[in-house]
Amino acid sequence: MKRLFLIFTLLFGASAFAQDDTGEWLQLLKQDLRAQKKDIVTKGMQTFTDEEAKRFWPIYDAYNTELGNFVDARYAVLKAYADDYDKMTDAKATELLTRRFSIQKQRALLDEKYRKQFATALSPRRLARFYQIEHEFDLLLELQVVSQTPKMKWW
């Protein structure tokens, strides 16, 4: 888990405030993050029956592929914030906040879309457990990001 936080901190925190950002580096970090997350889901779900695994993992892989778009979008907002940190205008702050809320809404829609698909692979209680694990993971990562991001200057 510590390795996962280090990866995520590098992905969102340090890279957003660094001058040299390469797409290849970002892709490698995202791949490692996905692998770590899959391991966390596997351990958190404890066991899958063969039938559950056969149905669940293809849906999960598609879900995570689409989640990658949100990683990219969140990174872009954080990078824009870093780029304008010392010269932030009210208009730019409003734009960044609007983008953040839009990402959150789209993420909720994605979860609703996939909840229906996951429900074909897991019982309701197993599905609830999966989303508990998913939510916990997201909260821990979000905490890591916000704790590494300087607060908006207001003066």
Image (cartoon, rainbow, N blue to C red):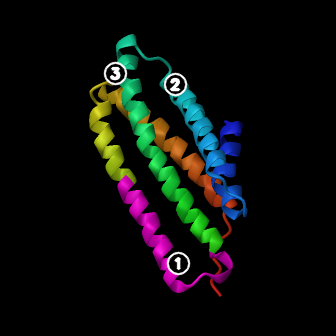
* Dot 3: element: helix
Q: Which residue is mark 1?
A: 93
- Residue depicted at 51% across the width and 51% down the height: 71
Q: Position of residue 122 (x, y in %)?
A: 33, 25
Whole-number angstrom distance, CA of label 1 to CA of label 3: 43 Å
The quadrant in which the N terminus is found is: top right
Residue 96 screen position, x and y as percent = 50, 71
Which residue is outermost to the top?
50
Counting every numbered tag in the picture gives 3
Q: Which residue does the image show at 39% across and 52% down from the upper left?
A: 107
Please say if the residues under marks 2 and 3 sit with CB atoms less than 8 Å apart.
no
Disc on res. 49:
none
Q: Position of residue 99 (x, y in %)?
A: 44, 67
Judged from the image, the secondary structure of the residue bearing numbered disc 2 is helix
Residue 6 in view of the camera:
yes
Residue at the farthest bottom position? 155
Q: Amino acid at mark 3?
A: Arg
Q: What residue is shown at x 53% (from left), y 64% (from top)?
A: 77
Q: Which residue is mark 3?
A: 55
Whether residue 129 can be seen here: no
Label 2 to label 3: alpha-carbon separation: 14 Å
Magenta-drawn segment: 84-106
How crowded pointer 1 is (Cα within 10 Å; few <14, some 14-19, many 20+) is rated as some
First reached walking from the N terminus: tag 2 or tag 1: 2
Q: Main secondary structure of the magenta part?
A: helix
Mark 3 neighbour density, 10 Å: few (under 14) some (14–19) many (20 or more)? some
User: Which comes sooner in the sequence, label 1 or label 3?
Assistant: 3
Q: Amino acid at mark 1?
A: Ala
- Can you tell which of label 2 and label 1 is closer to the viewer? 1
- Residue identified by numbered label 2: 42
Element class at badge 1? helix
- Residue 121 lies, in percent from the top left, at 31, 24
